[in-house]
Amino acid sequence: MSEQTVWQFTDDRGQLSATGERPQRVLAYIQAGATLWDHGIRPAGLFGSGHDAPAAPDPAKTGSLPLDGIAYAGAGTALDVDALLSGATDLVVAVSYGGGQVYGLDPETAKHLEGHVPVVVIDVGQARTLAEVGDRFAELARSLGAEEPAAATAELDVARARLRALTEGPDRARVLALSPAGQEQAHLARPRMWPELRVLADLGVCLLEPADGPGVNWSTTGWADAAALRPDVVLADIRSNATPLDELRDNPDWAAVAAAARVVPWNPEPVCSAHAHARFLEQVADALEG
């Protein structure tokens, strides 16, 4: 390695990025940017995926990240190398769901981008635990001179202990995770495919499993089938690409679910920090306790 190297990091593709100065202006995929914020790094800019609006980031994905003063490069087809580099970016932090492909960017755009600036990719896919994903973001943050406060770890320990205590005993609440997909359909999550849902299962939460069939991460079904599972708690996807629950008021099957279950907002692209994880566990615990 050159004596001029001041900063380096090997990402989850096994690709080493190295620069003569520690990066200061980080452009990040929304999920990564919100995670880095909880570690004390304010991203200079954000970009979204094809599911996101081109004009503004999805607030469901941003966690506690303040958006004032943070540039948004856009999403989907609006993204090109010029847009991504418009803010004097000196590091891009992206995510992947396996295979090393940069999520949210066209492969050619990602390739050309790496010709101009280091690109670090963190794997957030189902092959990893949420803790493993969090550890990788923590390693990246430390390389950039920042670290999540120790109080966040203590906060997470308290939340985990509370949730485990609430799931002891035979009469556990039945929890269903889903993403509304219009008046006729819902995507029911297969819990084993989602790292944050596997955490809930490990803590004793009774997660409802949809029927076998097509769909690796989701089982797409009618609302009547979702209602037939009789959940006590629903984790409902609140990202902008999901149907808002307010639009389902007149759907009798959803009305039956909502009348019997407590609804917890769920972001399937979680902020991978101890603070955000603790907040999610506390929301689930509040629903179980209620």
Image: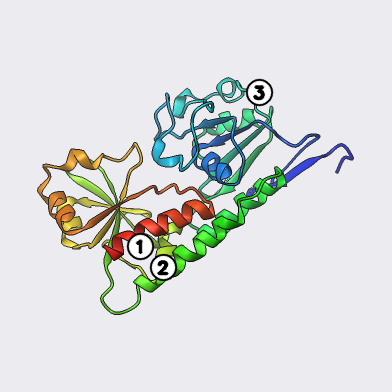
Q: Amino acid at mark 3?
A: Ala
Relative to 236, 273 lies left or right: right
Q: Give the residue furthest to the right.
A: 3
Q: Are marks 1 and 2 in contact (CB under 8 Å)?
A: yes
Q: Amino acid at mark 1?
A: Ala
Q: Give the residue furthest to the front.
A: 151
Q: Give the residue furthest to the bottom.
A: 170
Q: Is residue 251 above or below residue 218?
A: above
Relative to 277, 188 lies left or right: left
Q: Which residue sits at x=29%, y=65%?
A: 289
What element does badge 1 sit on? Answer: helix
Q: Are marks 3 and 2 in contact (CB under 8 Å)?
A: no
Q: Which residue sits at x=75%, y=37%?
A: 22
Give the quadrant of the N terminus: top right
Q: Earlier in the sequence, mark 1 or mark 2?
A: 2
Say few, some or many: other residues with alpha carbon within 10 Å of mark 1 (under 14 / 14 to 19 / 20 or more): many
In the depicted view, which residue is nearer to us: 86 or 233? Answer: 233
Give how far across and how far down residue 87 sits, in percent: 61, 22
Badge number at residue 285: 1
Q: Amino acid at mark 2?
A: Arg
Q: Is residue 272 above or below residue 244?
A: below
Give how far across and how far down residue 120 sits, in percent: 64, 41
Q: Nearer the viewer, mark 3 or mark 2?
A: 2
Give how far across and how far down residue 129 sits, in percent: 52, 60
Q: CA distance from mark 1 to mark 3?
A: 43 Å
What element does badge 3 sit on? Answer: loop
Say few, some or many: other residues with alpha carbon within 10 Å of mark 3 (under 14 / 14 to 19 / 20 or more): some
Q: Is residue 212 visible?
A: no
Q: Which residue is mark 3?
A: 88
Badge number at residue 162: 2
